[in-house]
Image: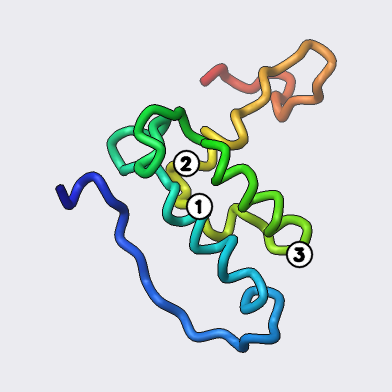
Amino acid sequence: MAEQWRGVVALAVAADSPLGRATDAVDVATAHLPPPNAHTQCTVCRDASWPCGPFDTAARGLAALGIPVGYLVPLDLHPVLWPPAAATADQPTLDLPGAPDG
């Protein structure tokens, strides 16, 4: 059962701070994080893929208050929320002339 939930910590913040005013959204966003071994399955919305509706609503509420949701989401889930962009031919690269590949 423990591997179905992510570890959490409690923080004390000023109630009238931006984060203090967003406690409901923080609680919903963190409650709806997927388990460590299933990045696309919401722990609470068992039949919903992640990010689920409640997480999305909470994330938008946080963004409206200027709180980046990425600060509350474990790093292993960042590629799920923000998939890497595919490279295009017109994108500048760091390849230097004469540099070995790889």
Residue named by callout 1 = 73
Mark 1 → mark 3, Cα distance in angstroms: 17 Å
| Residue 49 location (% of width, % of height) | 46, 28
Residue 82 figure quarter: top right
Mark 2 → mark 3, Cα distance in angstroms: 22 Å
Residue at point 67% right, 24% down?
85
| Residue 11 location (% of width, % of height) | 46, 80
Amino acid type shown at disc 2: Leu
In the rendered structure, the answer to whether residue 4 lies left or right of residue 61 reads left
In the rendered structure, the answer to whether residue 86 lies left or right of residue 12 reads right
- Local crowd size for mark 3, using a 10 Å CA cut-off: few (<14), some (14–19), many (≥20): few
Residue named by callout 3 = 65
Q: Dots 1 and 2: beta carbons under 8 Å?
A: yes
Compared with 26, 34 (above or below) is above
Secondary structure beneath label 3: loop
Secondary structure beneath label 1: loop
Residue 95 figure quarter: top right
Residue at point 68% right, 59% down?
62
On residue 60, which mark appears?
none
Residue at point 70% right, 49% down?
60
Compared with 32, 95 (above or below) is above
* Pick the front one: 13 or 54: 54
Residue named by callout 2 = 77
Q: Nearer the viewer, mark 1 or mark 3?
A: 3
Of labels 1 and 3, earlier in sequence is 3
In the rendered structure, the answer to whether residue 50 lies left or right of residue 100 reads left
* Pick the front one: 26 or 81: 26
Amino acid type shown at disc 1: Val
| Residue 57 location (% of width, % of height) | 64, 47
- Local crowd size for mark 1, using a 10 Å CA cut-off: few (<14), some (14–19), many (≥20): some
Residue 25 figure quarter: bottom right
